[in-house]
Image: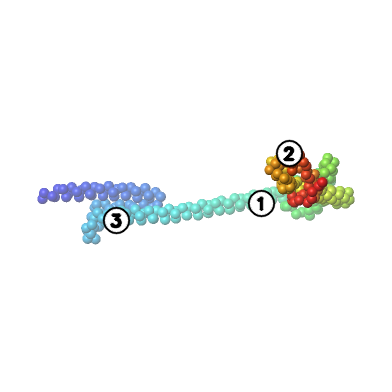
Amino acid sequence: MGYALPIEQDKRNLDMMWWAGSIGLLGLGIYVGITSWIAGLILVGFAVLISPYAFTQTLEKLKLTDKLHARVLIVLFAMIWSTYVLVVHTNMIATEQKAQAELETQQTAKRTEEQRIEAEKIRVEGIRQGYAADKEKVLSDFGAAIDAGDIGKASALHNQYALIIKDLEFVAVDTRFKALQAKVEQTQKEKARLDRIAFLQGQIKILAATEYATAITIYGELTKLDPANKSYQQNLVRFTKAEDAAREKTRKAEALATERAEHQKKIEAQFSGWDGSHRNLEQMIKDSMNDPDSYEHVETRYIDKGTYIRVFCTFRGKNAFGGIVKNTKAADFDLDGSYMREVQ
């Protein structure tokens, strides 16, 4: 009997804890039920199941004794199952809402289109009735505008009635309007063509004599605007030839400049960048001296002969008697620096 009270106290504490858990799960079920009544109902059902009274009755009927583990598993199962159901049910609700929204949009669009069609019918019928009531005036005003060349007023009457009224008298007047419209459009095109020609002719007058490309562009357009004008065609040919000649001249000049640059480069490569001496001629002079170590460069100059250069080298050195003398040697070398001949 000494252990009865502690055991009873533990049981009461455990029951209080599960009552609290049951109430918490019940509250969660009510909250979830706002979004998904199915998931909420599942949580409420499991909340009742884990309450001490209902759980005890269930265990007795099933003849089970592992109360704590069974209850925990029930709670976990309830949470997992309700979460799955919540997701599925929420997606299903969202799909239904989307479908409903699309249906409402289609219905709204359909009603709008029907209203537009109805309004168009009313407008067309109003125009027909108005034309029938004022037919003579409409035809008179339309014809007068055409006779006066008032394209603006005639266009307004055409736009108002042409697609609706199929009356033969109106069609006849409208045919006259179309002829006038074509004439006006042709006149406008011709005026635009003449204005463009005048503008291009003005541009030609201020062109520089060597602006071949611009002249070709202008005369090309003038030829299209006035194919019968022979002078435009002749000038187009003349400037085209002039441009081709200028291009060929430029090409030749560039080629000549390149050739000259290469020519000069070959010549300069033969001379020392330090004292300007011609390397090959200097070596030849040293080879012919009695005392090559006495060689002293004074000056080197050359004359470009086109296919070769003539080099003059002034130098000092010892002669056969040991005296320092000044002398000049000249020789011809090709553009690659090879010796050709000595010049006396």
Label 1: which secondary element: helix
- Cα distance in 3D space between marks 1 and 3: 71 Å
The one of 83 and 38 positioned closer to us in this rendering: 83
| Whether residue 81 is situated above or below residue 190 in the rendered picture | below
Residue at the spot of label 2 = 324
Q: Residues within 10 Å of mark 3 (few under 14, many from 20)?
A: few
The one of 296 and 111 positioned closer to us in this rendering: 296
Q: Amino acid at mark 2?
A: Ile
Q: Amino acid at mark 1?
A: Lys
Residue at the spot of label 1 = 121
Residue at the spot of label 3 = 73
Q: Using the rendered view, name the quadrant where residue 301 is placed.
A: top right
Q: Residues within 10 Å of mark 2 (few under 14, many from 20)?
A: some
* Residue 253, horizontal then vertical, whole percent: 80, 47
Q: On residue 169, which mark appears?
A: none
Query: Which residue extends farthest bottom?
Result: 62
Residue occupying image coordinates x 73% and y 45%: 289
Q: Amino acid at mark 3?
A: Leu
Query: Which residue extends farthest right?
Result: 230
Q: Residues within 10 Å of mark 1 (few under 14, many from 20)?
A: few
Label 2: which secondary element: strand
Q: Earlier in the sequence, mark 1 or mark 3?
A: 3
* Residue 67, horizontal then vertical, whole percent: 24, 55
Please state the total of marks drawn on the protein image: 3
Circle 1/circle 3 CB separation < 8 Å: no
* Residue 236, horizontal then vertical, whole percent: 84, 49
Query: Which residue extends farthest left?
Result: 1
